[in-house]
Amino acid sequence: MWKTSVPSAVKAFDRQETYEVELECYNRLKANGVEKINGLNVPVLEGFNHSSKVIEITFVQPPFFLDFGKVRLDRPPSDFYDKQKLANAQSTWRDLFGSRWPDVNAARYILRKNYGIH
């Protein structure tokens, strides 16, 4: 990600699929006027370029969402129903986010339920 001369940042992608998924996430959130989810700031899509695989988003202050590269749209990941894998992932996330885990988990739920971002 690069800082620009205006209050925005540019994200460049090497993989087409990652670019398309991330762009669609920002498009969905922008179309719904989302700038905050459960206390986490969400950058707003400012622009994009398909041939260069770049996305321009507004700058936001922490805590924030920034990376949607590993999400799935409109369906959960294939291992979502594997109870052991899900328990392991949630344990890792609890350790990673510490006391913020309940807020992050609630935000994950809102993204899934309201915007189809898994």
Image (cartoon, rainbow, N blue to C red):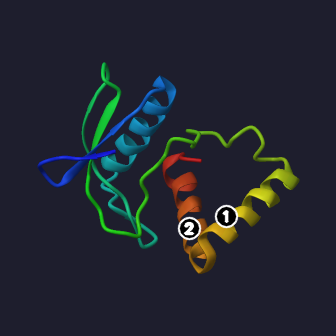
Q: In this view, does 49 lie above or below 41?
A: above
At which x and y percent is residue 89? 74, 57
- The crowding category of the residue bearing disc 2, from other C-alpha atoms within 10 Å (few below 14, some 14 to 19, many at least 20), is many
Asked if residue 62 lies left or right of residue 44, the reply is right
User: Could you tell me which secondary element the residue under label 2 belongs to?
Assistant: helix
Q: Residue furthest top?
A: 51
Residue 104 numbered mark, or none: 2
Which three-letter amino acid code belongs to the residue tagged 1? Trp
Residue 80 numbered mark, or none: none
Q: Are marks 2 and 1 in contact (CB under 8 Å)?
A: yes
Residue at horizontal 48%, vertical 26%? 15
Residue 93 numbered mark, or none: 1
| Mark 2 vs mark 1, CA separation in Å | 9 Å
Task: State the image quarter where residue 116 is shown.
Answer: top right
Residue at horizontal 41%, vertical 32%? 13
Q: Is residue 35 above or below residue 67?
A: below
At which x and y percent is residue 62? 37, 69
Q: Which of 16 and 44 is in front in this view?
A: 16
Residue at horizontal 26%, vertical 57%? 59
Asked if residue 37 lies left or right of residue 46, the reply is right
Q: In this view, does 110 lie above or below 9?
A: below
